[in-house]
Image (spheres, rainbow, N blue to C red):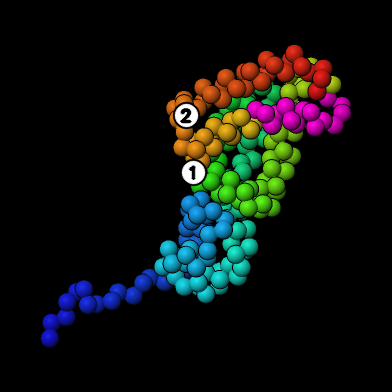
Amino acid sequence: MTVKKTDIKVPKKRLRPENREQQILEEAVSFFAEKGISGKTRELAARLGITQPLLYRYFPTKRDLIEGVFEKVYLHNLNPEWLKTITDRDRTLQDRLCEFYRSYSAATYRYDWIRVYMFSALMGEEMNRRYTKLIEKEILTPICVELREHCGMPSNKRVSQAELDHIWVLHGGLFYFAIRKHIYHGRVSKNFPAVVERAVNAMLEGTRSISANL
């Protein structure tokens, strides 16, 4: 009897636990970006070609999986060099902010990042609030301090909510560029560095005229 090659079942290669965990996380990021946080783990397991019990061996609950996605998509993309760039007073603030937003956008303004963030926000997920607080503390507050120096404002007081709101307008405006691209699938400029430069310049020029009110 001749055995056809198509009749031979080749066993699937078993992955090392750490590799399997990364495989699950990577597919989960794509899955949640497509389906939203409400996507079912049963469907995710099917896409991975594994059983749901095996998925739960690595992530016992869906909450554990979401936390893993949060760490992979958001926390692992935070670059400690960003703060060094923002606070380097040997360079102009305009130059520093333009470089920061070019680097930040490359790390975060991606299809999976933006869509997971928006889906989780609509579901009321805590990870959005955690990320917002983190960015406000580690990035936007230092920018406020540097903006004070740039405008000759007193630096011996706590950063106010008005100052943070002012910087959020810049930060949120650039973020909306990514939303238009990845959520609305709208037409956007191909020259994002130029968009950043114009936005930063407008913010810096405008801040001088309203600094007394911040």
The residue positioned 58% from the left and 45% from the top of the image is 118
The residue positioned 69% from the left and 31% from the top of the image is 168
The answer to whether residue 102 is visible is yes
Earlier in the chain: of badge 1 and badge 2, it is 1
Residue 70 higher or lower than 184, as above or below: below
Please indicate whether residue 88 sits to the left or right of residue 161 in the image: left
Determine if the magenta segment contains residue 156. Answer: yes
Determine if the magenta segment contains residue 189. Answer: no
The part of the chain drawn in magenta is: 155-170
Please indicate whether residue 210 sits to the left or right of residue 73 in the image: right
- Mark number, residue 188: 2
Image coordinates for residue 62, horizontal then vertical, percent = 60, 64
Image coordinates for residue 35, horizontal then vertical, percent = 50, 54
Disc 2 crowd rating (10 Å Cα; few below 14, some 14-19, many 20+) is: few
Mark 1 lies on residue: 111
Residues tagged 1 and 2 counted as in contact (Cβ below 8 A): no
Q: Quadrant of the N terminus?
A: bottom left
Image coordinates for residue 93, horizontal then vertical, percent = 66, 22
Q: Nearer the viewer, mark 1 or mark 2?
A: 2
Residue 81 higher or lower than 206, as above or below: below
Element at label 2: loop
Image coordinates for residue 8, horizontal then vertical, percent = 24, 77
Under mark 1, the amino acid is Tyr
How far apart are the two marked residues, 1 and 2, measured between alpha carbons?
14 Å
The residue positioned 76% from the left and 21% from the top of the image is 149
Please indicate whether residue 14 sits to the left or right of residue 112 in the image: left
Under mark 2, the amino acid is Val
Predominant SS of the magenta segment: helix
